[in-house]
Amino acid sequence: MAKVNAAAIRAADTLLRGVGGTQVLLRAPAPANPDDDGEQLGLSTPQFQDSPLCPVVYRRVRPRIGAVANTPTQYELLVSATAVNNLISSQAFDSADTLFAVAYAVVIDSVPLEIVSATASEIGGAPYMYRLLLQAPLALKT
C-alpha cells in the first residue's frame, strides 16, 4: 500500500504543477522563546512566521444557488501532501490537522485568508492532497 500512496502523491504533485501550481505562504505563530522574560509574562508582541506551501492551486468558489447575498467570498486551495508533510516534520507538528488548526492564515498575493476548513484526500488511509476552504477575515470584509 505504501507504493500506491507514493504514486498518488507523485501524481498529485504533477497534477498541481501541471495546472499552474504556485506557491502560497502559511502564516502560523512563531515558536515561543522560553528565555524571554517579557514573553513569559505575556508582554511581548506575538510573532508569526510564513512557511511556503508549493505546489498549490487555488480558485474562487462559486456561491451556491440560493445563497445569501452577503456571503463572504470563499476560495478553495488544493495543497500537495508533500508540502504539508515537509512542513509538519520541520515545524514538529503531530499532524496536518494540528498544523491547520494552529495556522493564522494562508497568504495569497499578500492577502491573508482565514482557513475555514481542511480536509484530506486519501488512498489507503494516507493523504496525497489537502483541500483548504478559505475566506477573507472579518477585517477585510468591510
Image (cartoon, helix red, strand yellow):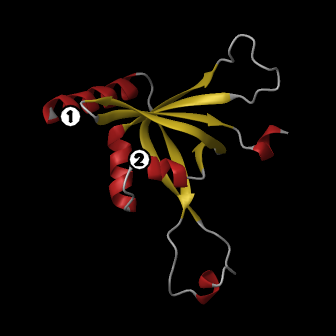
Label 1: which secondary element: helix
Mark 1 or mark 2: which comes first in sequence? 1
Report the side of 67 relative to 87 (left or right). right
Above/below status of 5 relative to 65: below
Q: Which residue is mark 2?
A: 96
* Residue type, label 2: Ala
Name the amino acid type tagged 1. Ala
Q: Is residue 72 above or below residue 45?
A: above
Mark 2, residues whose alpha carbon is within 10 Å: few (<14), some, or many (≥20)?
Answer: some
Quarter holding the N terminus is: top left
Identify which residue is drawn at 56% across, 86% down.
Answer: 36
Residue at the (24%, 30%) spot, across then down = 124
Within the image, what quadrant is residue 129 found in?
top left
Q: Position of residue 128 (x, y in %)?
A: 32, 33
Looking at the rendered structure, the secondary structure element under dot 2 is helix
User: Who is closer to the viewer here, 122 or 50?
Assistant: 122
Residue 50 vs residue 82: left or right?
right
* Disc number placed over residue 6 in the picture, else none: 1
Query: Who's the residue at 74% across and 30% down the image?
Result: 72
Residue 140: x and y, percent?
A: 78, 42
Instruction: Return the residue found at the far top.
Output: 65
Q: Distance from label 1 to label 2 (Cα)?
A: 17 Å
Horizontal placement of 28 versus 67: left or right?
Answer: left
Give residue 73's position: percent from left, percent from top. 71, 28
